[in-house]
Image (cartoon, helix red, strand yellow):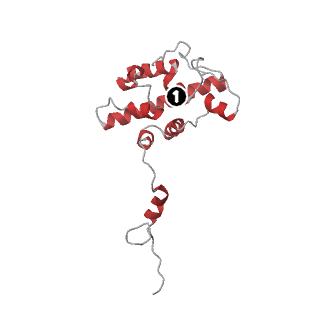
Amino acid sequence: VSDSITWKLTNDGLYTSSSAYHFPFEGMVKSDIYSTVWRSWAPAKCKLFLWMAMQHKILTADVLLRRGWGNNYFCPLCMRCLETAVHLLSECSWSRKVWEAIATMAGQRSLLPSTWNMETTFVEWLQGLNNQCTDATQAKGVQALATIICWEIWLERNRRIFNNKKTTGAEDHKLNPR
């Protein structure tokens, strides 16, 4: 009997590029993080930032401390707590006022900090923002808005650290809609 080559990743034993592509992902657990971040209507740079924040990869004070790098330790927005991604984007008193102001302007109750369950993980918190939405389209819009808010909080944090500047109206924790 002559030798034959059989591709074990398909039922019929024939090679397909699709089976070769899917092979590295065999046995992986699927996560809702993908749809939470990547299917949002937000700009790509905002989605990438949120993806990094969800994995605790943005360079906040806690990450810098773990790496042994110098930092200011305190959150540059509230100047009270250790700066972590979770604190900066959802727990900081300054950030919560931003969330509250935008939720009020947009008429989105799910974005109000008073409706959040802060005993969950950062990922669960983000996914929970969609719970009060009436349909998938509204949920996608809320997720895009949340992603952009997180990005803008990050930009304000960076302005304060690297440029020593505050956004107009940020000194008294108010947003000035124009």
How packed mark 1 is, by other alpha carbons closer than 10 Å (few <14, some 14-19, many 20 or more), is: some
Tell me the quadrant of the picture where the N terminus can be found.
bottom left
Count of labels in the image: 1
Position of 41 with respect to 132 (left or right) is right
Residue 165 image-quadrant placement:
top right
What amino acid type should be assigned to the residue bearing mark 1?
A: Val
Q: Residue furthest left?
A: 134
Position of 148 with respect to 83 (left or right) is left
Q: Pointer 1: what residue? A: 86
Residue depicted at x 62% and y 23%: 160
Name the spot of residue 139 as percent of width and height, x first. 35, 34
Can residue 110 be seen in the rendering of this structure?
Answer: yes
In the displayed structure, would residue 156 be above or below residue 136? above
State the residue in front, 84 or 66.
Answer: 66
Name the spot of residue 107 as percent of width and height, x first. 35, 23
Residue depicted at x 40% and y 19%: 114
